Image (cartoon, rainbow, N blue to C red):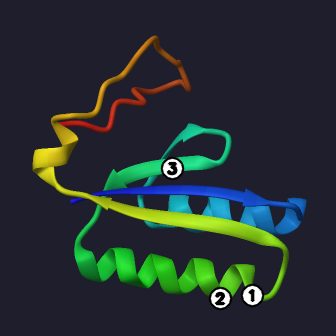
């Protein structure tokens, strides 16, 4: 299943830690505060726990979406971004 993480966090340090956690869990950055990648339900729950723990009581907001294969077919990409590697998340 596809996992999409989007966040809005005030603290630069915390924002960096959230981004690193997403990378540690194999997600690819698709925008400055958005990451996507395929994960099992268990792996997504582990990531969610880590993100919740990292944010703690600081000002910020994190959304973690699980997107099934059927709904992935409805995703539309418009334009392109080059981050040094393919930002496409569909296989």
Chain-order first, disc 2 or disc 3: 3
Q: Which residue is drawn at 33% across and 77% down?
A: 43
Chain-order first, disc 1 or disc 3: 3
Neighbour tally class for label 1: few under 14, some 14-19, many 20 plus, Cα within 10 Å: few
The mark tally for this picture is 3
Q: Residue at x 28, y 33 (%)?
A: 75
Q: Name above or below for residue 89 compared with residue 26.
A: above
Q: Name above or below for residue 20 compared with residue 41.
A: above
Mark 2–mark 1 contact, CB under 8 Å? Answer: yes
Q: Tell me the element at label 2.
A: helix
Disc 1/disc 3 C-alpha distance (Å): 20 Å
* View extreme (left): residue: 70
Q: Is residue 81 left or right of residue 61?
A: left
Q: Quadrant of the N terminus?
A: bottom left
Q: Name above or below for residue 24 compared with residue 38.
A: below
Q: Mark 1 points at which residue?
A: 56
Q: Residue at x 52, y 19 (%)?
A: 81
Q: Tell me the element at label 1.
A: loop
Q: Tell me the element at label 3.
A: strand
Q: Which sits in the foreground, 76 or 12?
A: 76
Q: Tell me where residue 46 appears, x and y as whole percent.
A: 42, 84
Q: In this view, does 38 lie to the left or right of 71?
A: right
Q: In this view, does 82 lie to the left or right of 32?
A: left
Q: Name the residue under label 2.
A: 53
């Amino acid at each position: 299943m596809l996992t999409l993480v989007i966040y809005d966090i005030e603290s630069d340090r915390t924002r960096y830690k959230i981004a690193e956690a997403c990378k540690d869990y194999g997600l690819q950055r698709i925008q400055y505060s958005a990451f996507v990648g395929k994960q099992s339900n268990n792996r997504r729950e582990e990531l969610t726990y880590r993100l919740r723990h990292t944010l703690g009581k600081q000002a910020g907001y994190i959304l973690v979406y699980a997107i099934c294969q059927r709904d992935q077919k409805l995703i539309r990409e418009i334009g392109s971004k080059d981050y040094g590697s393919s930002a496409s998340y569909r296989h």
